[in-house]
């Protein structure tokens, strides 16, 4: 386990012991639908597990635009369901779930 720091805009930094369990990186040449088909913006998603069994979710949004900057959003979640509520169901989120062995499925009989 490692000491981790996860920043948030206008909030305190999350500091915890844990490890990264999943990551999905958008790139400027892979269009992020949340940005209305702009190739100048992209997201990076990371998921960490903590020593006490919780999750820390991190989303970083970046831009090539003049004056653009990174935007950081994070949350602490108790369950995989809460993780999926934080990240949603986008293509990039589903890549993260696959990397973290989280099954984003709806089961019915």
Image: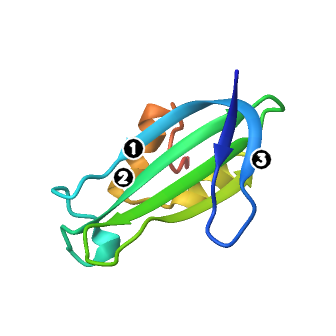
Farthest-out residue, front: 67
Instruction: Label 1: state its secondary structure.
Output: strand
Q: Which numbered circle lies on residue 78?
A: 3
Decide if residue 28 is in sight here: yes
Q: Nearer the viewer, residue 2 or 96?
A: 2
Q: Disc 2 marks which residue?
A: 92
Q: Are marks 1 and 2 in contact (CB under 8 Å)?
A: yes
Distance (Cα) linking label 3 and label 2: 21 Å
Please name the residue shown 63% across and 55% down the image. 7
Q: Depth-wise, is mark 1 or mark 3 nearer the camera?
A: 1
The number of numbered badges drawn on the structure is 3
Q: Position of residue 72 (x, y in %)?
A: 54, 63
Q: Which numbered tag is attached to residue 49?
A: none
The residue drawn where x is 22% and y is 69% is 40
Q: Is residue 80 visible?
A: no
- Circle 1 residue: 24
Label 1, label 2: how far apart the Cα atoms are:
6 Å
Above or below 36: residue 88: above
Q: Position of residue 70 (x, y in %)?
A: 44, 65
Residue 48, relative to residue 75: is it above or below? above
- Looking at marks 3 and 2 on the same chain, the residue that comes earlier in the sequence is marked by 3
Among numbered discs 1 and 2, the one appearing first in the sequence: 1
Check disc 2: other Cα within 10 Å, few if <14, some if 14-19, many if 20+.
Answer: many
Q: Secondary structure at mark 3?
A: loop
Furthest toward the right, the residue is 52
| Residue 3 image position (x, y, % from top left) | 71, 31
Does 52 sit above or below residue 15?
above
């Amino acid at each position: 386990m490692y000491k981790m720091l996860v920043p948030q805009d206008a909030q305190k930094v999350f500091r915890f012991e844990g490890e990264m369990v999943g990551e999905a990186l958008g790139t400027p040449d892979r269009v992020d639908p949340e940005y209305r088909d702009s190739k100048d913006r992209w997201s990076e998603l990371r998921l960490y597990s903590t020593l006490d069994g919780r999750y820390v979710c991190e989303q970083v949004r970046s831009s090539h635009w003049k004056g653009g900057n990174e935007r950081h959003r994070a949350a602490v979640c108790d369950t995989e369901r809460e993780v999926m509520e934080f990240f949603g169901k986008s293509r990039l989120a589903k890549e993260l779930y696959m990397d973290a062995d989280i099954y984003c499925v709806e089961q019915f009989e």
